[in-house]
Amino acid sequence: MNSEMKILSGTANPGLTDAICSHLGIPVGTALIERFPDGELNIKVQDDVRGTDLFIVQPTCCPQNEMLMELLMLIDCASRASAGRITAVVPYYGYARKDRKDEGRVPITAKLVANMLVTAGADRVLVMDLHAPQIQGFFDIPVDHLFAKPVFLKRLKQMDLGDLVCASPDIGSMKMAINYAHVLGTPVASCHKQRISSETVKINAVVGDVAGKNVLIVDDLVASGGSIATATEYLKEAGAGQIYACATHPVLCGNAISLLEDAPISKVFVTDTIPLPDDGVPEKFEVVSVAPFIAEAIKRIHMNMSVSYLFRDTEPQ
């Protein structure tokens, strides 16, 4: 596009937006986000965005309803201010767990959120490591689905992990584990998980040989921490050596941090798609920034260049 590129941020993760803009060498756009006395949001885009190629960065993380409403209102503001094109940059796409009707009388919230973004006025969506890749099909506008794998791989290749096995904590993450194993040249293992409740899981078996080997667990997010913590305990019982984990989105709700701190795991790698708690996390957590990666995607979208370039297994310089 020949129009000017501008980037706005909601309040969900302004640090990530600052880092993206720093990488691109442009300032963050200004927007007023405050509340009326009754608690309703009051939002105004303070920059002139008429005809611009506008990117609005806002993960829909906790508090999800607040952050989603901010994003919708920012899109609506920009649409009514005649922005040339509006791209919703949603590093963490909330409400993604419900991507189908797995029982009667339940919503498909991933589709509902997609409908709301389009109705608000988004022309394009940029996301990272969707909980279910088929959510891309819920949109009738272009969706660029990035993966944090190249960013994690760059960090992992700096470490001497020795005799390694890539593992998934459940069947749902098996494809991700296979992708990592393909690049790292390792065998694959998978845990057979049974969910007892929203916070409790049980591992019944490990498929694959992990005895005497280091293990890398990969997943798209860590929420309650139960799946990864339980998997590491079972893997240790199966004879695993050092255990590491890569989880893109650090949702970390409830007692997830203490649960993982007590688990027999050496290091937990997460990204900055979601801000970590203000009071910090234990030393075994390491944040790998995806800001340069997302910045490169934004630049390529703006310049009508290939975004599939970013699907390589090395992070762009």
Image: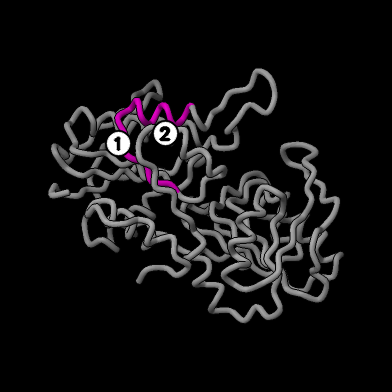
Residue 22, given in percent of the width and then of the height, sits at 28, 62
- Residue at 80% across, 59% down: 207
In this rendering, position of residue 306 left or right of residue 271? left
Which region of the structure is painted magenta? 112-127
In this rendering, position of residue 204 left or right of residue 268? right
Mark 1 = which residue?
123
Can residue 282 be seen here? The reply is no
Residue 32, given in percent of the width and then of the height, sits at 26, 37
In this rendering, position of residue 49 left or right of residue 294? left
Which residue occupies the foreground of this view, 135 or 277?
135
Type of the residue with mark 2: Phe
In this rendering, position of residue 98 left or right of residue 87? right
Q: Mark 2: which secondary structure?
A: loop
Type of the residue with mark 1: Asp
- Residue at 62% across, 45% down: 253
Q: Residues within 10 Å of mark 1 (few under 14, many from 20)?
A: many
The label number, if any, that marks residue 261 in the structure image: none
Number of callouts: 2
Q: Earlier in the sequence, mark 1 or mark 2?
A: 1
Which residue occupies the foreground of this view, 82 or 179?
179
Quarter containing the C terminus: bottom left
Can residue 192 be seen here? The reply is yes
Mark 2 = which residue?
139
